[in-house]
Structure formats: C-alpha cells, structure tokens
Image (cartoon, rainbow, N blue to C red):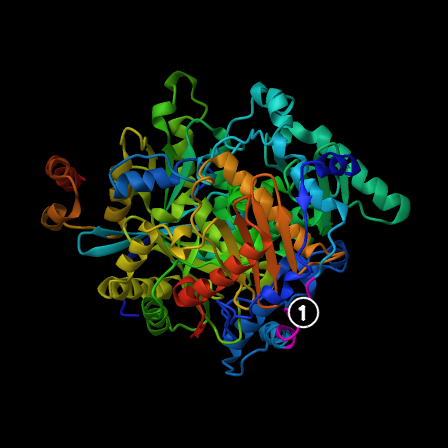
Amino acid sequence: MAAEVREAEQIVNVSDSESGQSDFIETEIPGKSNNSLLVASDEFDDISYEELNNGALQAAPMGTINALVKRKVKRQHSIIESDGRQSTVSEDDIANDVENESSEISGDDTQDDNLVLESNLADLSLQESGSLPLEIPSPHLISSTNSETDYVNSIEWKQQKKHIFILSDSGKPIYSRHGSEDKLVTIMGVMQALVSFVADSDKDNLRSIVAGDHRFVFMTRDHLTFVGVTRGKESTQQMLLQLTYMYNQVISVLTLSTLTRIFKSHRNYDLRRTLSGAEKFFDNLLNLMDVEPGLLLSSVRCLPLDSAVRDNISQTIVQYAKVKDLVFALIIAHNQLVAVVRMKKYYLHPMDLHLILNLINASESFKAAESWTPICLPKFDAAGFLQAHVSYLDDECHTCLLLLSVDIEAFYVLSECKAKIQEKLKKYNALAAINNSLRRNSYSIQQCSINDLRHFLYKARSTSQYTSPELEAPYNTKEEQERLFGLYYYLHDRIHTSGRPLKILFHVGPYETLLGWVTPGFELFAVFGPLVTKITAIHAVNKLLRWIKKEEDRLFILSSVTF
Amino acid sequence: MSGKKKADLKVIILGDYDVGKTSLICRYIDGKFQTQEPTVGAAFFLKQWGPYNVAVWDTAGDERYSGLSHFYCRSAGAAILAFDLNSPKTFESLWARFGSILEAANEDCLKVVVGTKLDLLNQSERDITAEEGKKLARELNEHLDLKKLPHEPYFETSSLNNQNVKEVFEYIFQHCLPLSADQQKRYNTTDRKSVIDLMEDSGEHSRKKKCC
C-alpha cells in the first residue's frame, strides 16, 4: 500500500476544513423522522472483524418468527418486544449529538491512505462485461465445457475488476462471481490453506492481503469462507460489508439454522446442491452493489411521490391487508421503495430490505404469476423463513407488491388482499402516479440549481433512506459512473475509517472536488467541479440541504404506518 | 375471504429443475412458448374449465424449496410429474424425490407422468422408452381404477411445438371435473383465446369423449 501512496501524492492535493466550521449552517435535518419504518442503522460502522468473531447475527433478535407463530397459537394479544429498542437508541443519540455537531470538525488529513484513491485513477480500464445486472448471463447456466477451463486461466478472468468467492471450511468451492466454481478448485484450495494456516498457527484470523493493486479480503463465518478480490476503490472495510451482504444472501436462501445443521452433520457437504438455482441472486446482488449506493450506505431510495399519494397507498394497504400474521407489506418499483406497512413493534432493517429488492430484481419469474416463496431476513430472524406473496400490480410489471407473513398457509388470503389492493390503487390512480414518477426519472441535479454541483448522495440516518439525483453528464458513461462510484467509496471510507473518523472532508482531486459531511443526523457526499473553493462548496451544501428539506416530503417516507 | 378464488380443483406440477414445467403451463395458459426464468418458490395460475375454477400450481424444481411442498401438495386433486425425455436422471427423480412429497395430496390424486422437450428427442436414441413411462404412470396410480381413464396417464409433449400440451390438462380436468359434451360446447367459446383453434379442437374432442 505504501508504494501506491507515494505515487499518488504528486497528483493529489488534499486539504480538510478546519476553520470553515462556522460556515456550516445548522439546518433542520432533511428526511429526519422519529417515526421511522426502517431500523436506523449504519451497518458500515457496525461491521468489524471483532464483531464477526462474536457471532454478530446470533446477537441479533432471534426467534422473532417463532414468537410470532407462538403468539398466533396462543392467541395472545400481548406484543412481543423486539428491535423497537434499536430505534429508540438512535433517536436519543441524535438528540444528544445534534448540539455539538458543528463544533466537532476533525481536521488533520496527513494520514496517508486517503491518497490510495487517486493512485489508480489512470488505471480505469474497465474489463467488466455487460452493463445492466440482468444482462449478464449467469455463468452457471452455461454448460460446463473446455472453454470454461480456458476462461478461468485467461487474462480476461484475471483482469476482472472484482472477484467474489465462497468456499466451505473444507475448501469446497461454492460460488464464484466470474467463471465456473468447478474450475476453481485449486485456487479455492489455496485460499482455504491461507485462512487455515493463519487460524491454526496463532489462533488468529486472516483479514486482508494487499498485493500490487489487488486487495484480498477474507471473512469466515459459520463454516463458510468469503473472499473478495478487488482492484477497485473499495477499502477493506467496504469489502467486508460486501462480503457480509453475500453472507446475508446465503442465509436468506437457507436460514442460519439450516446452514449450521448441514455443516454440523456433514463437514464435507457440497453446499452447491442446496444452493442450486440461487446463483442468480448472488450474481445480481453483486451487480447491484456496483451501481446502487444504497448498499454502501445501508439505506434505501424512495420513489419520489407526493406525500398525499403515498399516504393513500399505505392506508389502502392497511385497510385491505389487515390479516393476522402479516408482518410487512411493501410496494417496490424499480428498486425504489414506494410504501411500507409493518406490524407494530417490528421494523425492517435496510440490509434485509436490500435482500428483498434483490429477490425481486433478480427474478423475472414473478412477472408471470402470483408467487409464494420463502425468504429469510437475517436481521429480522436468521433462524426461520418468512413467506412472501409476490405479485405485480400493473400489466407492465413495474410496481411490485410484497406481503410477508409467518403463516405458510396464508397464500389464498393474501391473494385476495392483493386483488383488493390492486383494485383500489387503480381506482385512486395511485398506480398511474407511480408510473409517472418512474417515467420522470427521479430528478435532475439542475433542479437543485446549485452551480458546479455535479452529483450527491444524501442519507437521512434516522430513517435509513437516501436520495441522489440522476446520473447526468459527465457521469453518463459506464466508465465515468464507475469512477464516480470510486470517489464515493473513497469519501465514504475516509469519513468512516474506524481508526480516525472525520466529520467533514474537503478533497480536491484532479477532475472534481469532493465534500463529505457527516453528522449524527445525516451523511452527505457531494461532488463538485474541480475548481470549486472550500467556501463555495460549503455554501453550496448549505443550500443543498435547504433544497432537500423543502423536497423531503416527496423524497422520503417520513411516517411509518402500522397494521 | 369471499371465496371468489376458491378453486374446485388443485393441480400441481412437479419435477426436476429445468425440465420445462413453467413452459408447459405457459404454453397451455398463455398459448405461447417463451424461454422461462427459473421459478422462485411456487407460482399460482387460475384456469377456467367450464363452470369450474382450476388452480394450477407451478413449483420450483430446486431442492431447497422442498419446505413448500407440503403447502402446495395438500388437497391436490391431480399432479403432473414432469421429466425431460432427454434426461434419464430427471425421470428417476420422479420416483426418488416426488413420490413421498405427494403423500400429502388427496387420496384419489391422479398422477400424470409427462415427458417434456419431445422436439429435442431423437427417437432412435431415446433412453427412456414410452413403455417405461407408462409403467411408472401405472405404478403411481395403483390406487385408481385406470380403466375409467381413456388411456394411461402418460404423455410426451413439446411446449415449443405445442404437441400434446392441451391434451395433458384436458385429460386431467375431464377426469377430475367431467364436463358433458353439451357443457363443453357451451363453455368452450369463452374458454379460449384463439377462435380458430377452439372450433376445430372442441368439435373433435367432444366426439372423442363420447366414444369412450
């Protein structure tokens, strides 16, 4: 890593704001709500290797589904306490921290790794094939031939920007993002050897290796080893987050109980057998991570809608889907949240929501007919499945309704709910409103009317939702988008680096100027043209915050509706 | 819970991954062939048969969804056991995997063995003979009086060329929810999307039924 830094120093000029603190105006936090529908989470800060060793998932509320089912059996009306706690904590945090927010600006920027970002700017040749998630054919569906063996030995394979591998304790290949895992037995064996050598020799864990411009990140959990190899801009921590998403996806397909049971009885089990058909979820999730900042931010994007329309939609769901054992009801359009209704006391975690989005995004088959499928939401309850009733509400299959229940027999009841909800939403023109919003493509950066602001990501922490404008010129090519994403990775990592987190970072790069600003209430990452000064940038983000505040009813879901 | 969707018959389709279960159903219900994405979980179709509603459950072939099988098998009146005519493994699975799953179905559940992808089959090199298929069909339906059926519950189909697809479903429906020739005529007009198809087929069909 040291070598990279030295190269970069010559072309980069980085400076932090130390004196500018008083220029940041305390505005009311846009998109803030005390009545959140999602668990307020900054998963990124929570993820660490220490956490992993303590079994992060088991610590999460377990047996939620069991509790719900038991309650159903006993017909008790007392409501089980669950993760309601989490949301209260975060609210308090905000209240405490808001006061000293502006005084805590961390200045020093001499730390070297911030320069890693720029080191590879010249090296932005992008070998990744395909552009949209769905267009990339799953390598697993192609029949195994010699050409596959050739592929994994080819330069093309080696130059893929990011590899993700999953293997079992005993070194059995389970999944590879590029190329058939069948053909990668040897290399997976090497990975397993590295992991177990470190584990055996000093009871330690192998975390990461940096070799040239490649970063290898390892994560071992529940008999599975996840390995990410990247030559992109992701930091070790960010890769760890991505591997955690992969782990959650495995759990989502199998449940943690099944996974543990399998490996308890057969250490040598070939998990591919059980995961067959699920590869597309892994592929799609990884593609989603490359284009969707929500996964990095542990937050979701809402479809911009008038709050009256949105209220109408949620109320329709409440009215027509008042069914026992229905835990969550969601409407999703093009990876954006339209509405969520939840059972009292139960919250949806953004990471779980991303798995739901991925389920919808990865499977065309839902467009054919109403479906009924098990899904495990690891943050909700890693031990069991919820049953999802999935259907599209419009003929063009843009708007998807999900009804998540703990009752496997509920299909027909939910199917009737769906029919009624669909009828009402059509009648109220809500589906038309959703389609209109989809057609309008979110919003253009010009609508914020701020000079030289090119793009931004704004996350409201209390509601775990984010907003960002459309990607426009100069970020209208895949290469440029990827570069922009790299800038966000860099900014995000610098601000959240566990060793020395920053409040504000002003960074002047060769092609753009970046400003990152994190408070207990929000995270803002803004990208300006290269010639913007610190003062201009500060004024601009203040103006931006006011604009977002003005639009917040449309851009965020601020009230949480319960059954 | 108006019972609007209460179906008179539940038909399920089982079989290994990628044998063409969804294609078979879509060919019958939508009347067209298109490549299908792998099914996730189970998908629900409703089909009119005369005055009756028939629920058709399409299921995912992947083993990890076996937890759902109890749900869709219960009270099934008929099951289509699909295998790929070109893959002996999928034929063996019918016995090995799905026999036990079907214990949850109705006692008088009609089990129809259906070979798919007939268009890909080279008759001179086939691994599974029609006789073997029929034998399995007989064994699976030991509990039924097969003499009441027009022929053994075994079909070889091609969803691509629309060979024998309609026949499978109508064989099942006619067994479980028999329509008189008169009813068939009356409902057939509203039943199909393609007018030309239905005039030809329905006439022929009802005549056939009468002979049996």
Question: Closest to the observer: A263 or B16?
Answer: A263
Q: Position of residue A165 (x, y in %)?
A: 65, 38
Q: Label 1: few (<14), some or many (≥20) within 10 Å?
A: few
Q: Quadrant of the N terminus of chain A?
A: top right
Q: Quadrant of the C terminus of chain A?
A: bottom left
Question: Closest to the observer: A86 or A17?
Answer: A17
Q: Residue at x 27, y 50 (%)?
A: A395
Q: Residue furthest right?
A: A202
Question: Closest to the observer: B43 or B147?
Answer: B43
- The answer to which image quadrant residue B19 occupies is top left
Q: Is residue B5 above or below residue A212?
A: below
Q: Is residue A129 left or right of residue B187?
A: right
Identify the chain of the residue marked 1, using the numbered disc in the image.
Answer: A
- The answer to which image quadrant residue A18 occupies is bottom right
Question: Range of the magenta residues?
Answer: A96-105
Q: Is residue A424 above or below residue A479?
A: below
Q: Is residue A102 magenta?
A: yes
Magenta segment, prevailing SS (helix, strand or loop): loop
Q: Is residue A62 left or right of residue A391?
A: right
Q: Is residue A29 visible?
A: yes
Q: Is residue A240 above or below residue B136?
A: below
Q: Which residue is mark 1?
A: A103
- Under circle 1, the secondary element is loop
Q: Position of residue B111 (x, y in %)?
A: 38, 45
What type is the residue that disc 1 sits on? Ser
Q: Is residue B89 magenta?
A: no
Q: Position of residue A540 (x, y in %)?
A: 50, 57
Question: Closest to the observer: B174 or B27?
Answer: B27
